[in-house]
Structure formats: C-alpha cells, structure tokens
Amino acid sequence: QVQLVESGGGLVQAGGSLRLSCAASGSILSINAMGWYRQPPGIQRELVAGITSGGSTNYADSVKGRFTISRDYAKNMVYLQMNSLKAEDTAVYYCNAEGVTYKRGSLYYASEKAYWGQGTQVTVSS
C-alpha cells in the first residue's frame, strides 16, 4: 500500500513564495519519477513539474524560471518551490509518483499504476 500526502498549500500574495511538500509512504523500494500537477477551476489537470530518479527535470512553460522541483530520495519526498507567484497559479496542486517498486511479503513488485495525493489548494491573491 502506497500513499502520497501533500502539504504546504495556502493563501499567498502575488509575487510571494510557497513551498509544497509531498511524502510517499509504504513499503517502498524506489520511485522512478515524481511530479506535481495542478487543476485550475474548470480546467483539465496539467503537469507543472516532474523529476526522475536520475535527476532529470521538466517544467511547464508557464512556470519555468519561477518554480523548482526537487527530491529527497532517502525520504521518498518531493518538493515544489514556487517563487514570483501569479494569480494564474491558483489551483489545486497534486503530487504524483510513477514507477513505484514496493515490497509485499518477501518480494518486490513494480506497480502498474501511478499514485496520486489528495491535493492541496494554492490561492494567489493580488
């Protein structure tokens, strides 16, 4: 059983900063990729930033230069540092983990599904 829990969302002023955290728990051996998605009201969920086990990162064009994604591999955590926030960044942010290898009994398995957190609300006011 794998669970993701996000924290760090809240209300901030435009131009301000916020740091989101996501912790993956369970009998986890490794996670290939982790990322952050967001879903503004009435819009499809979209990728904000992702990072692989090799450290490769990618960002949505709208957040390049402002957001930074990082991982703590030992703790199975991923972070999103958000700077120079804009009103357009307002959304529910979701943590994602893919390529999870976990232990069940005495064996390890590669999960066939992605895992998602419950989401955390980020609201940017002007």
Image (cartoon, rainbow, N blue to C red):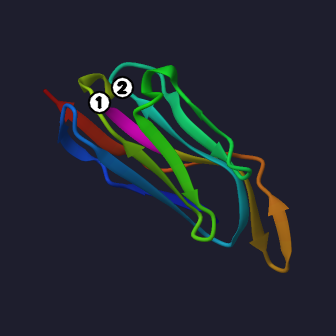
What amino acid is at disc 2? Answer: Pro
Q: Mark 2 falls on what kind of element?
A: loop
Which of 19/114 is in front?
19
Q: Is residue 49 above or below residue 51?
A: above
Residue 98 can be seen in this image:
no
Count of labels in the image: 2
In percent of width and height, residue 77 lies at 54, 61
Q: Which mark identifies residue 10?
A: none
Determine the residue positioned at 57% across, 56% down.
71
What amino acid is at disc 1? Answer: Thr
Determine the residue positioned at 80% across, 78% down.
105
Q: Mark 1 falls on what kind of element?
A: loop
Q: Which residue is most to the front?
A: 65
Q: Main secondary structure of the magenta part?
A: strand
Whole-angstrom CA distance, mark 1 to mark 2, is: 6 Å
In percent of width and height, residue 82 lies at 36, 41
Determine the residue positioned at 75% across, 66% down.
102
Q: Which mark identifies residue 40?
A: 2
**Where is mark 1, residue-wise?**
90
Determine the residue positioned at 50% across, 21% down.
61
Q: Which residues are magenta?
A: 90-94
Q: Is residue 87 above or below residue 92?
A: above
Q: Mark 1 or mark 2: which comes first in sequence?
A: 2
Which quarter of the rendering shows the C terminus? top left
Q: Which-is-in-front pick, marks 1 and 2?
A: 1
In percent of width and height, residue 94 lies at 46, 42
Q: Which residue is most to the right?
A: 107
Which of 27/72 is in front?
72
